[in-house]
Image (cartoon, rainbow, N blue to C red):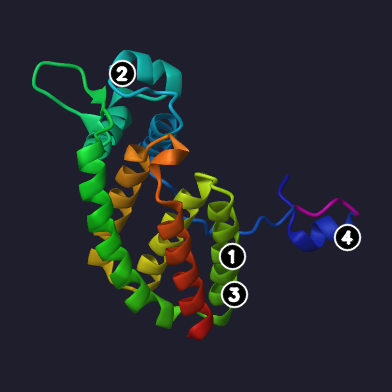
Amino acid sequence: MWYSIRQWNTLGLKPIPQTAPDTAPRRLLRDVVFDKLLAAIVDGTLEPGERLNDDDLTKWLGVSRTPVREAIAQLHTFGLVDIEANRFPRVARRDDALYAEATAFLAGLHQLAREWGLANLTTTTRRQTSKDVAAAVKQLEARDISGVSALLDIQGRLAVASGNNLLVQAEEPLRIRVKFLSPADPDAFDWDALIVASRDLQALVAKE
């Protein structure tokens, strides 16, 4: 028998719970697979040069081949996967010369991100950015490689704050590629230059 809400209340029955509508944007499966493969490549679970077999990946991720292939194609555009005709895709190998070129290009994009993005920060986002930069400075002073990644991501958020979609579309894949190509040896970094750059950014955030 169907009861109205009023009848439910009159009979002393527990009211039907009212579920708030789900306003969170739904993510495409290919994007979920992309994030998982990206994390596995960056953290070394999938090693440079390792073959990416569709059957193995679908079993590992529990998805069909289509989102796996779409994710691999996107990783290829990011420079993290090599694709050749009649061969399985492979995780790209690190290349010092390419890393130097990509880092220089990314530095130019991040200069624009600072110029265009800082002015658009709200009081809340500026305060959070200031805290994040301060934390990155401490990591860099401690010669902690994670500080390098943190500094890159902060400037990536400034690119988003700029409101320029072309900048965002160019910056994100290049930043991910630089992080992938980044050396694992702490001695390979110019820590003094990184500390100066992070402190300069810290001063710019506080100045605006």
Q: Which residue is mark 4?
A: 10
Q: Is residue 177 left or right of residue 154?
A: left
Of the image marks 2 and 3, the number of the one nearer the N terminus: 2
CA separation in Å, label 2 and label 4 = 66 Å
Q: Are marks 2 and 1 in contact (CB under 8 Å)?
A: no
Is 176 rendered above or below residue 67? Answer: below
Residues packed near mark 1 inside 10 Å, few (<14), some (14 to 19) or many (20 plus): some
Residue type marked 1 = Ala
| Residue 79 shows in this picture | no
Residue type marked 3 = Arg
Task: Look at discs 2 and 4 and give the one toward the viewer.
Answer: 2
Q: Which residue is mark 2?
A: 50
SS at mark 4 in the image: helix
Is 73 rendered above or below residue 168? Answer: above
Q: Which residue is mark 3?
A: 127
Of the image marks 2 and 1, the number of the one nearer the N terminus: 2
Residue type marked 4 = Thr
Q: Which residue is mark 1?
A: 134
Residues packed near mark 3 inside 10 Å, few (<14), some (14 to 19) or many (20 plus): few
**Region rendered in magenta:** 12-16
